[in-house]
Amino acid sequence: MKAKRQLDVLDKNHATRRNLCSDEYNIADIATYPWYGNLVLNDSYKAGELLDMASYKHVVRWATEIEQRPAIERRRRVNKTWGLEETRVAERHDASDFD
């Protein structure tokens, strides 16, 4: 129930602004997205039905917008050593590692 309360607070917050602290994407979104974004978009704890995550439309919108950022795609690839070769970057030392 704590997660539902937190999602409700986030949803109300995102109803009035694009991102967590303002309309500008910032460190608060970067820090918060991995847990809440994964929770609402990927049903990471298999609690989607119990938490009724689809009802938190503003949180889902926020997470979906962040999910589309190029940095998130790069984040998924860093330190990934499994899967198709073009989807992994085992070690990252330079921006060219993604080319």
Image (cartoon, grey):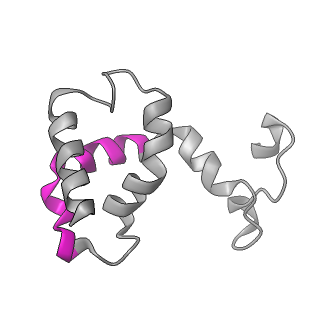
Q: Is residue 57 magenta?
A: yes
Find residue 18 and report its horizontal and vertical position in percent.
27, 29
Q: Quadrant of the C terminus?
A: top right
| Residue 55: quadrant of the picture | bottom left
Depth order, front residue of 48/87: 48
Question: Can residue 50 be seen by looking at this rendering?
Answer: yes
Find residue 17 and report its horizontal and vertical position in percent.
23, 27
Q: Is residue 48 above or below residue 95?
A: below
| Residue 98: quadrant of the picture | top right
Q: Residue at x 19, y 76 (%)?
A: 49
| Residue 39: quadrant of the picture | bottom left
Q: Residue at x 73, y 73 (%)?
A: 82
Q: Is residue 53 magenta?
A: yes
Q: Residue at x 55, y 39 (%)?
A: 70
State the extent of the magenta-drawn residues as a range: 49-66
Find residue 36 and report its horizontal and vertical position in percent.
37, 54
Q: Residue at x 58, y 39 (%)?
A: 71
In this image, 2 relative to 75: left or right? left
Q: Is residue 49 above or below residue 85?
A: below
In this image, 18 relative to 94: left or right? left
In this image, 32 relative to 12: left or right? right
